[in-house]
Image (cartoon, grey):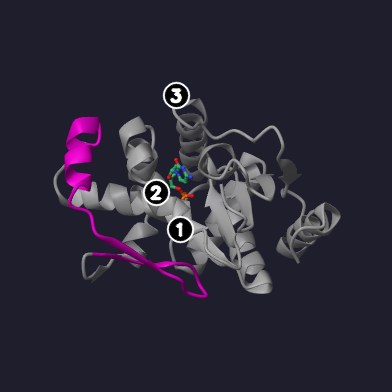
Amino acid sequence: MSDIPVITIDGPSGAGKGTIARQLATELSFHLLDSGAVYRAAALHALDRGADLDDEASVLVALQSMKATFKPHPEGVQVWLDDRNVTSDLRLETTGNAASRVAVMAGVRESVLDEQRSFRKAPGLIADGRDMGTVVFPDATLKVFLSASQQVRAERRSKQLKEKGINVTMGSLLQEIGARDERDSSREHSPLVAAHDALIIDSSDLSINEVVAQIRSALSAADTVG
Ligand code: DC
């Protein structure tokens, strides 16, 4: 346990956790943990080493040689595997799906626990992911569970991809989001679930600023940070 404040933001992919977490971290001058990036880096490293993503032992052997560096950046964390900048590879849909596959493995989750907790430094931390409030920081100062309908998340993702010049059909996006939700929520170890003491926010009809305002007012009500 630690006195350093932590705000956890958990929720399904595409709910806006990353954007909200970055904005809050900037406003409060807190550190930021993008735990999805930790799982994405693990999956990428395992793939690079030729591991079989359906075989936990094979993935764990690969992870023994992983040297990942996470550097804060205004547009999201920058990630190196050894001395290779893998930030853009990390954001690929294929890497997200591979991350979701290795994230079902208890040994993988255990192996990244200390790394994630090491981000808890003064003056405080904003941690986003799936199990930040339930498993990694159960003593968090404030726990937020951010959701949005699958339709809204698919529309947001489609817009982001269009901005990058990539066109995908809504049908395929909805299918991918549904499959990822199902795997993240139904897994045995640390499934995606709201902590019993989490503030639940449905961001389907809210702007980023409205979500941040709700979190800030919960913080003021708790009279803890900010
Ligand atoms: O948030 P993201 O899309 O970058 O996460 C990629 C995958 O990593 C996600 O589908 C499940 C896994 N993950 C996890 O199991 N636990 C976390 N705390 C964060 C991510």
Q: Say which amino acid is labelled 2.
A: Asp
Residue 85's x, y, as percent?
Answer: 28, 70
Out of 205 and 17, give the one closest to the viewer. 17
Q: Is residue 224 left or right of 170 when viewed as pictured?
A: right
- The answer to which of marks 1 and 3 sits earlier in the sequence is 1
Residue 62's x, y, as percent?
Answer: 18, 45
Q: Say which amino acid is labelled 3.
A: Glu
Labels 1, 3: front one: 3
Out of 186 and 63, give the one closest to the viewer. 63
The residue located at (55%, 52%) in the rendering is 128
**Picture mark count:** 3
Out of 63 and 5, give the one closest to the viewer. 5
Residue 168's x, y, as percent?
Answer: 46, 52
| Residue at mark 3 to residue at mark 2: CA–CA distance | 20 Å
The residue located at (61%, 60%) in the rendering is 21
Report which residue position mark 3 lands on: 188
Q: Are marks 1 and 3 in contact (CB under 8 Å)?
A: no
Labels 3, 2: front one: 2
Q: Is residue 105 visible?
A: no
The quarter of the picture where the C terminus appears is bottom right
Report which residue position mark 1 lands on: 167
The local crowd at label 1, few if under 14, some if 14 to 19, many if 20 or more residues have their Cα within 10 Å, is: few
Q: Is residue 142 visible?
A: yes
Q: Image quarter for residue 197?
A: top right
| Residue at mark 2 to residue at mark 1: CA–CA distance | 39 Å
Report which residue position mark 2 lands on: 114
Residue 124 magenta-highlighted: no
- The answer to which of marks 3 and 2 sits earlier in the sequence is 2
Q: Say which amino acid is labelled 1.
A: Asn
First to last magenta residue range:
53-81
- The answer to which of marks 2 and 1 sits earlier in the sequence is 2
